[in-house]
Image (spheres, rainbow, N blue to C red):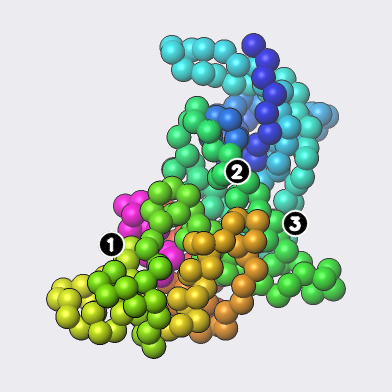
Amino acid sequence: MLITLKGIVIGQRNVGENSRFLDILTEEFGVIEVTANAVKKINSKNAGSTALFTYSKFCLNKSSRSGRSAYSINSAEPVYSFHKLSADFTALSLAAYFAELLKYTSASEQNAGNLLRFFAISLYELERSVLPPASGRTDFAVAAVKSVFELKLAQILGFTPDLIACADCFCYEHDEMYFEVSEGRLLCNDCFSDVNGVEQACFVLKPPLLHAMRFIVFTQPEKVYKFNLNEKHLRELGFITEEYLLYHLGRKFKTLEYYKKLTKGN
């Protein structure tokens, strides 16, 4: 059976001399493994469409093996290629981290339209962050893209933090608010002093940082990257979003460790 769908290639594994297994994030079926026969040949018509981080329209052969769906490429047409990411190792390593997150969190054969759209937006912003200023881009750091992706992904996966107000007294804003990672909740300074045993699981949020986190959570993916933080607060945001997402996923990621090695000291 032939099916047509759009998706982004988020992983590749070589098979023999000329073929590859591809991990493709699709709207209809989540992350699926697709066989791309002879795609490594110089004259392959599908080489560009199956490159890593390419958004393409695929015509796939779908069959069933041992009760599971199997896919192979019949034809493919590129829609947009994020090939500029390859010019910057830091941006490329971050894209690889995003891809590993998606492969871990996206169930096969389930709709992933929100994830696909958000991933495409994030790759676009990541690509813009490494283009020269003359291109007219906004000066948005690679680290900011990481923070937004982590917190928004947590929300899409169902781990939405409660950032509306203090969980105890409903205070909306304080000079210092505390974000409790394990519960995903806010505590104002007054209520935090009355709670025992949560200090190690909390981050202090100054108003600019709290406003940024609220913006990320309550803004649609198409506009979520339109905010600014100074370098100090951006670093703090990076610690918080990473800790929050990894805590609720319950694991570490090798691609993240590689990214952090590349950015150590920056």
Residue 114 location (% of width, % of height)? 56, 44
From the image, tell me which residue sits under label 2.
116
Sooner in the amino-acid sequence: mark 1 or mark 3: 3
Kindly tell me whether residue 260 is visible in this rendering: yes
Q: Quadrant of the C terminus?
A: bottom right
From the image, tell me which residue sits under label 3.
84
Q: Residue at x 65, y 61 (%)?
A: 223
Label 1 and label 3: CA atoms lie apart by 39 Å
Report helix, strand or loop for mark 2: helix
111 shown above or below 205: above
Disc sitting over residue 261 in the figure? none
Q: Amino acid at mark 1?
A: Glu
Depth check: 172 or 34 in front? 172
Sooner in the amino-acid sequence: mark 1 or mark 2: 2
Depth check: 258 or 99 in front? 99
Residue 255 location (% of width, % of height)? 49, 55
Comparing labels 1 and 2, the label whose residue is closer to the camera: 1
